[in-house]
């Protein structure tokens, strides 16, 4: 809040050397936000290399030691016999399987909504929009009841299947095809005797690479970072994904929760666990990054 | 209306092609329709059914809504969420649009790319990870900004996470993780504004501020509305932040801060599934109708 109040009057005041002053202002605002966005991550990286004492007494941006880092790693993996590795494996399993289903389902659906006419199309489009706007977390309890009714509670399908349903992906694909791929192109292919599936497979799909990357990225991140659904569906530690797992670790840190007994986890170990939890998303982001802008643009540039 | 017309018209002209297309279209959406019914329509219907019945399945009218509404924690949770949403949406609109405009002006090439990437990094820490990071940032004993915290008058973790501060803290956490993605989106949308429009504004003598206010922001409107809709829906379902904070707060923050925590408690602590369903239904109705108002006002989905 206070930052806006700062910025607005400064921008409006008469500028003797408009170029220099506004450049400086722009630069400093952007830098302040770089600090805001990056400092916590940097701190987290360094915290994992320190002992708990160093964390409290040393300068916050000092580097610890390899020794302390390894000690933290051993302390972390010792928690419930490598539980952290198990949680990582679980997360990967859940996120990747549901990602595969999402792509197989969402891309053809978005394509069909955009490029073909069929009965119920408009109705489906509207319900996709409505469902997309529906907050998922409010459906967690009803989903629990539904999954419970078909006896899938405690199995990985209780979260993989709900994750696979990704209306936002259908909507993105739909927008992409309506705006970026000319219908004439498909009509020409049909004229040449291409089957409907052939048109999709040979014309539409190759053109859709950016949007596939985009949907894949958003869906992966959404699945990897979801907390509420697995928290409810998979209460057993051995089945938790990493998100719920690190939440579990948190309640074993004495400085946050003095009631813990022998199984204590120290703060640097928790910082390390957080790092471990985010690494896959960062890696995927690095690969998907170039599609993020180009995909977004492709969705809106062409008429 | 118009749509049915055109499709009927083309069907009359090329009956075979249209029928073939129609069949293919249905085949392409079939799997999605199954998932839509199983994980969109059915749970919603289930929630509504449970909200209006009791544990034995008898219709009870609005009694579940009354019971939960009179629960001593309900109004508290509603007002917490309302205050949080005001902070969160305001900060998102002001800072995301502002930063995207600044980036767009300054940044050509590598600098812009690097900044967008740096801003986006926390996006990877959504969910539990972002809350954990901020628990550290807000704990004066280990925080890198502990001097800032003490300048603001906070010396212990308990003081920082006092209930009155929570809407601001949750806003900071949510903004930290969510803003980068939206900045990328807004930046992309700004890139899409045709150069001749920007050129014309410059020739007409508009300065940067005027261009932003009169040309760029109006052209971003749809994206801003879209962001607000999704952020509203996301903000109303706050769960992981208060839930983890309640684990770490030595009892300062309760387990019933947000409405979703309340549904969780009704369902799994108090064994009142029907009450939980009633709260879920209320949240759904509020989120979807707010979204509907935005959509109707902005014409966001006019793409049709």
Image: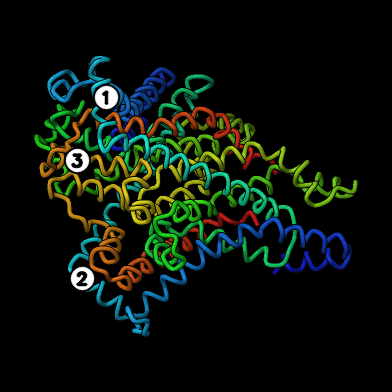
The answer to whether A15 is drawn above or below residue B140 in the figure is above
Q: Percent position (x, y) of residue A211? A: 62, 40
Say which residue appears at 16% left-offset and 34% top-offset.
Answer: B139
Residue A210: name its quadrant. Answer: top right
**Chain of the residue under label 2:** B
Q: Give the position of the N terminus of chain A as an image quadrant.
A: top left
Residue denoted by label 2? B71
Residue denoted by label 3? A252
Q: Percent position (x, y) of residue B111? A: 47, 20
Secondary-structure class at tag 1: loop
The residue nearer to you, when weighing A177 against B38, is B38
Front tag of 1 and 3: 3
Say which residue appears at 39% left-offset and 37% top-offset.
Answer: A88
Whether residue A179 sits left or right of residue B242 in the image: it is: right
Secondary-structure class at tag 3: loop
Residue denoted by label 1? A48
User: Are the residues flagged by discs 1 and 3 from a single subunit?
Assistant: yes
The answer to whether A138 is drawn above or below residue B200 in the figure is below
Residue B267: name its quadrant. Answer: bottom left
């Amino acid at each position: 809040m206070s930052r806006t109040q700062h910025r607005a009057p400064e921008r409006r005041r008469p500028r003797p050397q408009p170029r220099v002053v506004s450049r400086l202002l722009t630069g400093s605002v952007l830098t302040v936000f770089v600090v805001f966005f990056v400092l916590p991550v940097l701190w987290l990286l360094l915290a994992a290399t320190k002992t708990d004492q160093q964390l409290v007494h040393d300068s916050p941006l000092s580097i610890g030691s390899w020794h302390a880092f390894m000690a933290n790693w051993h302390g972390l993996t010792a928690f419930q016999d490598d539980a952290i590795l198990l949680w990582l494996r679980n997360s990967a399993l859940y996120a990747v399987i549901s990602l595969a289903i999402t792509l197989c389902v969402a891309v053809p659906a978005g394509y069909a909504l955009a490029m073909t006419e069929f009965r119920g199309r408009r109705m489906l489009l509207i319900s996709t929009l409505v469902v997309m706007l529906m907050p998922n977390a409010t459906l967690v309890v009803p989903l629990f009841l539904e999954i419970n009714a078909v006896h899938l509670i405690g199995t990985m399908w209780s979260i993989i299947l709900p994750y696979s349903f990704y209306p936002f992906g259908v909507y993105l694909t739909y927008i992409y095809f309506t705006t970026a791929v000319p219908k004439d192109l498909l009509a020409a292919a049909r004229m040449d005797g291409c089957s409907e599936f052939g048109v999709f497979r040979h014309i539409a799909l190759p053109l859709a690479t950016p949007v596939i990357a985009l949907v894949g990225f958003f869906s992966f991140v959404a699945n990897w970072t979801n907390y509420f659904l697995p928290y409810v569906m998979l209460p057993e530690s051995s089945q938790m994904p990493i998100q719920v797992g690190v939440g579990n670790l948190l309640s074993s840190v004495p400085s946050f929760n003095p009631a813990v007994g022998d199984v204590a986890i120290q703060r640097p170990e928790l910082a390390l666990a957080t790092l471990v939890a985010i690494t896959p998303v960062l890696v995927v982001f690095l690969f998907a990054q170039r599609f993020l802008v180009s995909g977004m643009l492709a969705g809106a540039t062409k008429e | 209306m118009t749509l049915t017309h055109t499709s009927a018209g083309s069907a009359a002209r090329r009956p075979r092609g249209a029928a073939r297309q129609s069949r293919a279209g249905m085949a392409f959406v079939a799997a999605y329709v199954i998932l839509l019914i199983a994980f969109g329509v059915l749970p919603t219907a289930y929630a509504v059914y449970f909200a209006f019945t009791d544990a034995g399945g008898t219709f009870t009218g609005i009694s579940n809504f009354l019971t939960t509404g009179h629960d001593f924690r309900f109004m508290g949770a509603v007002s917490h969420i309302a205050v949080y949403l005001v902070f969160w949406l305001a900060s998102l609109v002001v800072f995301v649009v502002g930063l995207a405009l600044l980036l767009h002006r300054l940044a050509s090439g590598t600098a812009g790319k690097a900044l967008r990437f740096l801003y986006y990094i926390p996006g990877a820490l959504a969910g539990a990870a972002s809350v954990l990071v901020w628990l550290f940032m807000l704990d004066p004993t280990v925080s890198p900004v502990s001097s800032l915290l003490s300048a603001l008058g906070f010396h212990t973790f308990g003081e920082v996470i006092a209930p009155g501060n929570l809407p601001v803290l949750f806003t900071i956490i949510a903004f930290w993780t969510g803003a980068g993605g939206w900045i990328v989106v807004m930046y992309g949308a700004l890139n899409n504004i045709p150069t001749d429009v920007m050129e014309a504004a410059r020739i007409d003598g508009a300065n940067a501020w005027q261009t932003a206010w009169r040309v760029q922001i109006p052209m971003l409107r749809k994206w801003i509305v879209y962001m607000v809709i999704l952020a509203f829906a996301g903000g109303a379902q706050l769960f992981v932040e208060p839930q983890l904070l309640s684990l770490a707060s030595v009892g300062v923050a309760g387990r019933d801060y947000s409405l979703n925590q309340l549904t969780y408690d009704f369902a799994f602590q108090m064994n009142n599934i029907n009450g939980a369903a009633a709260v879920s239904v209320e949240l759904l109705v509020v989120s979807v109708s707010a979204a509907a108002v935005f959509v109707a006002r902005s014409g966001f989905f006019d793409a049709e």
